[in-house]
Image (tube, rainbow, N blue to C red):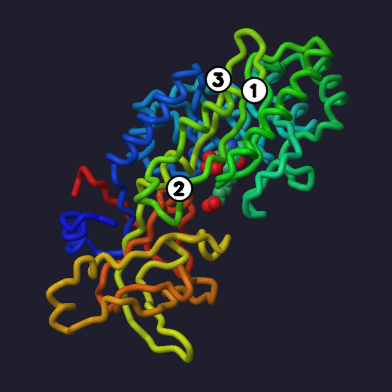
Amino acid sequence: MFEQEVTAKFKNIPTPFYYYDVEVLKQTLQKVKEESNKYGFNVHYALKANANNKILNIIKSFNIGADCVSGNEIKKAIECEFSPDHIVFAGVGKSDAEINFALENDIFCFNCESLQELEVINELAGAKNKTARIALRINPNVNANTHKYITTGLEENKFGINLWELDAVIAALKEHKNLKLIGLHFHIGSQITDLSSFKTLCLKVNEIQAWFVNHKIKIENINVGGGLGVDYHEPDANLIADFAAYFKLFNDFLELLPNQKVHFELGRSISAQCGTLISRVLYIKKGVNTNFAILDAGMTELMRPALYQAYHKIENLSTSPPSPLQLERGVRQDGVRYDVVGPICESSDCFGKAVDLPETLRGDIIALRTAGSYGEVMSSAYNLRDRVKAFYSDEI
Ligand code: LLP
């Protein structure tokens, strides 16, 4: 829950907007660095989680690399002064223009997802007389036990090269003179809260490594992707994810070869808790079995609930403590049940059903917590809405 002084600052700002707590982001990054440095691990920030300039500048200042999935993300990372030698480029459908852009900027590594992609990168690198450093994204067929839309490491998913294709890949690499194999890449999914999935991944990586060792192929880098989950239900109790346990697990279970480097691509766990979507209640409406609290923010600003039925904690900031107006009106503090919805013309534009809030009035300020990852970056202008703005704790 936000402190009163913070809530007071929101009163003069038109809603909806994203509010980023810069201190929370910095504390999170501090912890990421502290825990990953214990083992000499390399962390890349997945720009897909949040590509806001100010957020990226802060992340970059902690000496973290970038994980990009489009040419424009690479461009943005470079603009925010991430060093190209710390940029990895993933994605199942890299276009020729994007590959060329990455080659021109000498990024650290392409995470390659198919036999045909290897062929295309080889050809484009050859035309520029360059050698592209590549990692093979291998689909480890590990279940991340998360939402089906954010599971990526199963054979049925479109991502990565399947284990049964490895012989063909190695044969192709022998032919592709403009590629240099420098690593193996894995990513099993996102919002993973059961750390045992990562242990399963480590054991699988060890098995796959053994295959490469048997084939006398040297692998310098192991990239285990991202996916560490955050606490959407109790953000204040668990503001910073358990990076200590997370990195320790990889240190305990990955069997590394001498001098091998380990890379991570973390998105959500770095930026989710520093961001909140702030909105106002436009109307309260009585339904048949429920009340609706209609907000001025909707799926255009935060798409996760509509897209994945994702949970974001909803707080009425105007009632904690109750404002003089609410006291004067004698509003109920014991909880009234609302469907909290947005203004967009879609039934899925709903942030939460049967949410218990203190009695809520038009004009109350509502916070949707844990929205710093996959929030602003997934916002849209559907219904020709204005693009959502952002404010920062050190500026307001
Ligand atoms: N590396 C790769 C190859 C990925 O595909 C992803 C996320 C990441 C790293 C970062 O994962 P993270 O640490 O953030 O879990 N829009 C969805 C999440 C999609 C994640 C896609 N890939 C959501 O709002 O939940």
- Picture residue at 46% right of the left edge, 30% below the top: 244
Q: Which residue is mark 2?
A: 373
The residue closer to the viewer here, 98 or 280, is: 280
Q: Is residue 243 visible?
A: yes
Q: CA distance from mark 1 to mark 3?
A: 29 Å
| Lower sequence index among marks 1 and 3 | 3
Against 395, residue 164 (above or below) is: above
- Picture residue at 74% right of the left edge, 36% below the top: 139
Q: Position of residue 361 (x, y in %)?
A: 27, 79
Q: Position of residue 193 (x, y in %)?
A: 55, 45
Residue 308 in the figure: left or right of residue 230? right
Identify the residue at the far bottom of this view: 288
Q: Position of residue 156 (x, y in %)?
A: 78, 47
Where residue 131 sits, quadrant-wise, is top right
Q: Secondary structure at mark 3?
A: loop
Q: Amino acid at mark 2?
A: Ser
Indicate yes or no: mark 1 CB to ligand 1 under 8 Å. no
